[in-house]
Image (cartoon, rainbow, N blue to C red):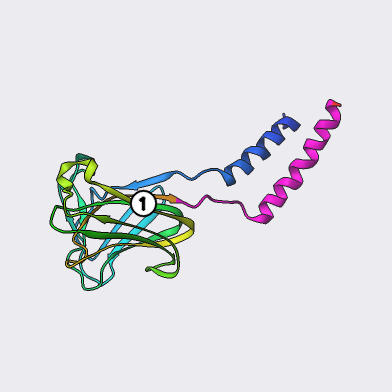
């Protein structure tokens, strides 16, 4: 029976690749809601990450389209009208970054806000916020130039709240939610085991080369 042996160089390369995997950047996921339908809950999934969206007051989230620029496709979200402003998005795993686009037709000024939370359901510590005033002179039907993008970034974001406040709460449209999941880092015990296996091999390889 032939036994295949792993060279010290191969072991070192394997160790390096394994450690790099744990610290590597996470891929961004874009949720465009094209297959979503109106309801009290909208659930979208991409590459194992699930986003559950619902209104803070328990009402229905509308899906409308086409609205805004061509880049928004055929479906956008609208929460209007609400008694408690906002759409909440819960993540099935913590994320480190989230952004969403918004826009409105030229009727009034809109204060558009995005807030990141440490807990589900827009609870727990506030981790980051972003806001912009969308002027009544701007019309989303003008295209991409009329779209604003809000973003938040922090370790351990479990949910976000995106909302608009004025005389008609949550009367703006939302689309293209972009989320970056937190990178998966190996447990300390796993790192210690890998280091214990790989470092002696690297030391031996150096001695042989010397």
Residue 125 painted magenta: no
Please name the residue that numbered disc 1 is placed on: 99
Give percent across and percent down for residue 55: 26, 67
User: Which image quarter holds the N terminus?
Assistant: top right
Q: Quadrant of residue 166?
A: bottom left
Q: Position of residue 121 (x, y in %)?
A: 37, 69
Label 1 packing within 10 angstroms: few (<14), some (14-19), many (20+)? many
Image quarter where the C terminus lies is top right
Callout 1 secondary element: strand
Magenta-span inclusion, residue 193 = yes
The residue drawn where x is 78% and y is 36% is 202
State the residue in front, 44 or 85: 85
Residue at 23 percent of width and 41 percent of height: 144
Which quadrant of the view contains residue 159? bottom left
Quarter holding residue 201? top right
* Residue drawn where x is 68% and y is 55% of the image: 189
- Residue 109 is situated, as x and y percent measured from the top left of the image, at 20, 58
Q: Position of residue 67 (x, y in %)?
A: 16, 48
Range shown magenta: 181-209
Residue 34 visible? The answer is yes
Question: Can residue 7 be seen from the camera position used here?
Answer: no
Would residue 194 appear left or right of 75 to someone viewing this image? right
């Amino acid at each position: 029976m032939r036994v295949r042996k792993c060279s010290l160089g191969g072991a070192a390369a394997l160790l390096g690749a394994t450690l790099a995997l744990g610290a590597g950047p996470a891929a961004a996921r874009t949720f465009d809601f094209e297959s979503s339908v109106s309801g009290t809950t909208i659930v979208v999934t991409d590459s194992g990450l699930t986003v559950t969206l619902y209104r803070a007051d328990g009402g229905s989230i509308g899906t409308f389209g086409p609205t805004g620029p061509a880049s928004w496709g055929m479906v956008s979200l609208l929460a209007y009208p609400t008694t408690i402003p906002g759409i909440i998005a819960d993540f099935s795993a913590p994320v480190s970054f989230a952004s969403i686009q918004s826009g409105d037709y030229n009727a009034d000024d809109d204060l558009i806000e995005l807030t990141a939370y440490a807990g589900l359901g827009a609870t727990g510590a506030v981790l980051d916020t972003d806001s912009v005033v969308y002027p009544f002179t701007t019309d989303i039907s003008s295209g991409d130039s009329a779209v604003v993008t809000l973003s938040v970034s922090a370790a351990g974001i479990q949910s976000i709240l995106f909302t608009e406040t004025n005389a008609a709460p949550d009367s703006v449209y939302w689309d293209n939610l972009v989320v970056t999941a937190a990178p998966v880092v190996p447990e300390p015990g796993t790192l210690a085991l890998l280091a214990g296996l790989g470092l002696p091999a690297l030391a031996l390889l150096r001695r042989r080369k010397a």
